[in-house]
Image (cartoon, grey):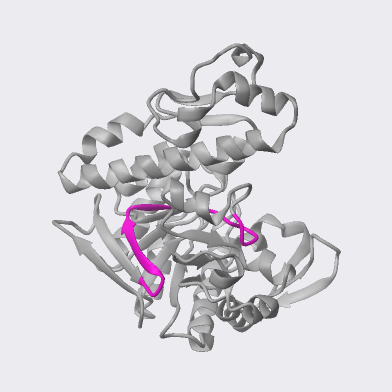
Amino acid sequence: MSFSFKLLGDHTAFGPRRGRITTSHGTIETPVFMPVGTQATVKTLSPEELRAVGAQIILGNTYHLYLRPGAELVREAGGLHSFMSWDRPILTDSGGFQVFSLAKLRKISEEGVSFRSHLDGSLHFLTPERVMAIENALGADIIMCFDECIPYPADYAYARNSTALTTRWARRCQQAHGRLEEQALFGIVQGGMYADLRRESAASLVELDFPGYAIGGLSVGEPKELMLEMLEAAVPELPVDKPRYLMGVGSLDYVVEAIDRGVDMFDCVLPTRLARHGTALTASGRLVVKNAEYARDFSPLDAACDCNVCQTFTRAYIRHLFAAREILGLRLVSYHNLYFMLKVMSEIRQAIDVGQFAEIKKKYSSYR
């Protein structure tokens, strides 16, 4: 198939590692952070700007694209790459997180999930087979199995039954996947906050021999220490020679801890969501630029940053844009935040290459 993963340099089964994913739309150096383009767009930014900030791969949301504009329309357009004019790799999730986040609108059964659209209340039914057909139509390079993201907290019996269901759905997804040569299908480890279930889930998915594995159902409200405990239970069960993807995690203090435990891939809306609320990521921590204290601050968002925003605009100007409700303010901080996040990931890769990850982990382990 057109997908491969190669580990670079020395590595262990559990620890920071460097890798390279190859797809038909280009290569991805890992560890990697993937900006989230929920509806075939990373909010406020063009594909040209995403390339400029260094995005290697972006993520699209199967649930939202299924509802609008529809998978068949995207197929007619030539797939997501053509539809959104993005020539680098794309990953689509399966809609499993929406099973979790839209709990009041859905009902889960062995066959699949029935839910009402958050847009118009219309009734829909997604099965593993239907999700595979949708993801095949969207045409991303990496696609995810349909799963249930277990809420936190959840009792042991619920978590055990849900985890077993996710494994059965993974088997059905694998059987229904119609574009094996073009799209890499990842299994998703679940198990709630129970270490034994995490290990069992990972082991059962490894038996199915997916090209890569995601770890889902974390960063859903649990304490950081518990999330790390679950990673420590799951990651050693996964193959050394296949990529490991921690879903929905983008806070730098979490990211460096996960990399130290052998994770290769991350995604999160956090950098762009913070930006839309007037918060910039800087070398010295988060800066709420929309605050009045920056009204006469003519320094850049981050003096240590060489992005176009920091080289061109001041905090005072950007603060004015937010006060005036001008869209440019959201765009500028979104651009900067993704540039900052992806630059840090590049620094992390370089640190691993030269055996200095411990130093960069210390730098960002308490980032706020």
Residue 307 horizontal side relative to residue 40, left or right? left
Horizontal relation, residue 57 to residue 271: left or right: left
Q: Is residue 34 magenta?
A: yes
Left or right: residue 254 versus residue 48 is: left
- Look at 56% across and 35% down and name the residue there: 333
- Identify which residue is drawn at 39% across, 75% down: 24
Q: Is residue 114 left or right of residue 145?
A: right
**Residue 16: x and y, percent?**
25, 49
Location of residue 277 in the rendering, given as x and y in whole percent from the top left corner: 65, 33
Is any part of residue 125 visible from this angle?
Answer: yes
Number of marks present in the image shown: 0
Vertical comparison of 295 with 168: above or below: above
* Residue 232 sits inside the magenta stretch: no
Image quadrant where one finds the N terminus: bottom left
Q: Give the magenta part as a residue range.
A: 23-41
The image quadrant that residue 26 belongs to is bottom left
x, y percent for residue 293: 61, 12
- Up the image or down, 233 lies above or below 270; here it is below
Most distant residue in the front direction: 312
x then y, percent, for residue 174: 48, 83
The image quadrant that residue 202 belongs to is: bottom left
Please name whichever residue, 206 or 306, is drawn nearer the observer in this view of the structure. 306
Identified at 31% across, 57% down, the residue is 29
In the image shown, does 222 or 267 lie closer to the viewer? 267
Whether residue 225 is visible: no
Q: Is residue 343 above or below residue 231?
A: above
The quarter of the displayed image where residue 107 is located: bottom right
